Image (cartoon, helix red, strand yellow):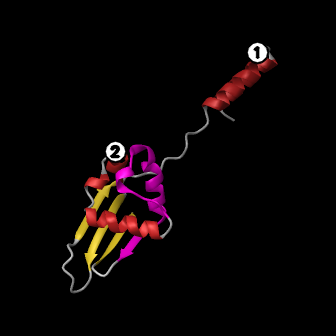
């Protein structure tokens, strides 16, 4: 039992508070002391985007590693990821039934995106290259 709750009940027991007053205080205290929604810890975690050319192909090799703390702070990751990689990731996500557009990423939906990426990875294979997007 919390210290505040004990104090309210003690004041009730010695007659300094009525039952109604104690109930209101306890209700108010419970409403303000609820823990905030858990926030995923992003320290030491990164968003990776990797494009590897297939053997014998001349596609450029791309490796982007962005600290999730920067992403959460509002960094526009669409400017860091090559257009070719963005298009391949978006096409693969669309084929999987998910709508995803790098240009639509905002600070409002970033938490949802990061949470989803922590639980999955996106792998796109084409004739030219292999694209991977994941968090670790």
Tell me what residue is drawn at x 30 percent, y 49 percent: 76
The tag on residue 104 is none
Residue sticking out furthest to the top: 16
Helix, strand or loop at mark 2: loop
Q: Which residue is mark 1?
A: 17
Label 1 CA crowd tier, 10 Å (few <14, some 14–19, many 20+): some
Instruction: Find out whether the residues at labels 2 and 1 contact each other: C-beta distance under 8 Å.
Output: no
Count of numbered marks: 2
Q: CA distance from mark 2 to mark 1?
A: 49 Å
Question: Which residue is found at the position 44% from the left and 66% from the top?
Answer: 93
50 is higher (above) or lower (below) than 1:
below
Question: Horizontal and vertical percent for residue 50?
Answer: 29, 69
Answer yes or no: is residue 10 visible.
Answer: no
- Quadrant of the image for the N terminus? top right
Residue 77 colored magenta? no
- Label 2 crowding class (10 Å Cα cut-off): few <14, some 14-19, many 20+? some
Percent coordinates x, y for residue 97 in the rendering: 51, 66
Q: Residue at x 36, y 56 (%)?
A: 102
Please tell me which residue is depicted at 61% across the width and 36% down the height of the picture. Answer: 34
Residue 29: x and y in percent read: 65, 27
Query: What range of the chain is rendered magenta?
Result: 98-125
Location of residue 24 by image quarter: top right
Query: What is the secondary structure assignment of the residue under circle 1?
Result: loop
Q: Which residue of the protein is positioned furthest toward the bottom in this rendering? A: 56
Please say if 38 is above or below 23.
below
Q: Nearer the observer, disc 2 or disc 1?
A: 2
Q: Is residue 84 left or right of residue 125?
A: left
**Residue that carries the numbered disc 2 in the rendered image:** 74
Q: Could one spot residue 80 in this view of the protein?
A: yes
């Amino acid at each position: 039992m919390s210290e505040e709750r004990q104090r309210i009940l003690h004041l009730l027991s010695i007659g300094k508070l009525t039952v109604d007053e104690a109930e209101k205080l306890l209700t108010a205290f419970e409403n303000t002391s609820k823990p905030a929604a858990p926030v995923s810890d992003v320290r030491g975690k990164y968003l990776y985007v990797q494009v590897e050319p297939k053997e014998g192909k001349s596609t450029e090799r791309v490796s982007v590693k962005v600290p999730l703390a920067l992403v959460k702070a509002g960094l526009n990751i669409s400017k860091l990821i090559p257009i070719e990689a963005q298009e391949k990731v978006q096409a693969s996500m669309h084929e999987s039934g998910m709508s995803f557009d790098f240009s639509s990423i905002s600070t409002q939906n970033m938490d949802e995106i990061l949470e989803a990426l922590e639980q999955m990875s996106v792998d796109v294979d084409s004739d030219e290259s292999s694209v991977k997007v994941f968090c670790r």
